[in-house]
Amino acid sequence: MTRVPELLAAGVPVAFGHDCVMDPWYSLGSADMLEVAHMGLHVAQMTGQDAMRNCFAAVTTTPAQILGLDGYGVAPGCRADLVLLQARDPVEAIRLRATRLLVLRAGKTVASTPAATATLQLPGRPAQVDFMATRGGHRQGG
């Protein structure tokens, strides 16, 4: 692992990635870029709010910019390759390992997953918890 915070401070674009996905060298790779961001922020000791946002960018926008991808982004005329996460912001996406609600490639759905909820069976508590309802805590609904 290189000196990511120092590179970012010097204005060098930093992208994270991994190439070992169930191969003989590392059989635990999952090709999950949120996992890569999560591991990267721990290894680089980037646990502040802005630093975590930089780690999210290191697996999303920055690699696309470094590669010079045409039609990248969320705007009219772009390819519409995206993953819709069940999170309000990058920090929450990494912290909660956000559910991937929808995966689009060229504007077509290639995968979808229902939103995550939890069912509680505690006396005096609501039956369900919506993990995305409030920032910094859980709002019960039910």
Image (spheres, rainbow, N blue to C red):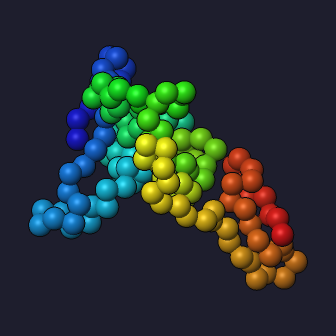
Is residue 45 visible in the rendered structure shown here? no
Q: Is residue 43 left or right of residue 127?
A: left
Q: Position of residue 133 (x, y in %)?
A: 74, 53
Which image quadrant for residue 117? bottom right
Which of 3/74 is in front? 74
Q: Give the percent coordinates (x, y) of residue 115.
A: 63, 62
Q: Residue furthest left?
A: 24
Residue pictured at 69% horizontal, 54% vertical: 132
Q: Is residue 3 above or below residue 23?
A: above
**Depicted 98 relative to depicted 65: above or below:** below
Q: Which residue is most to the right?
A: 124
Q: Position of residue 113 (x, y in %)?
A: 55, 64
Instruction: Report the residue at 23% width, 41% height from top.
Output: 1
The correct choice, above or below, for 96 with respect to 141 in the image is above
Q: How many marks?
A: 0
Horizontal relation, residue 126 to residue 131: left or right: right
Q: Closer to the camera, 104 or 37?
A: 104
At 52% from the left and 32% from the top, the residue drawn is 74
**Residue at (37% x, 36% y) in the render:** 58
Asked if one can make out residue 17 in the rendered structure from this viewpoint, the answer is yes
Residue 27 percent location from the top left of the image: 21, 67
- The quadrant of the image that shows the C terminus is bottom right
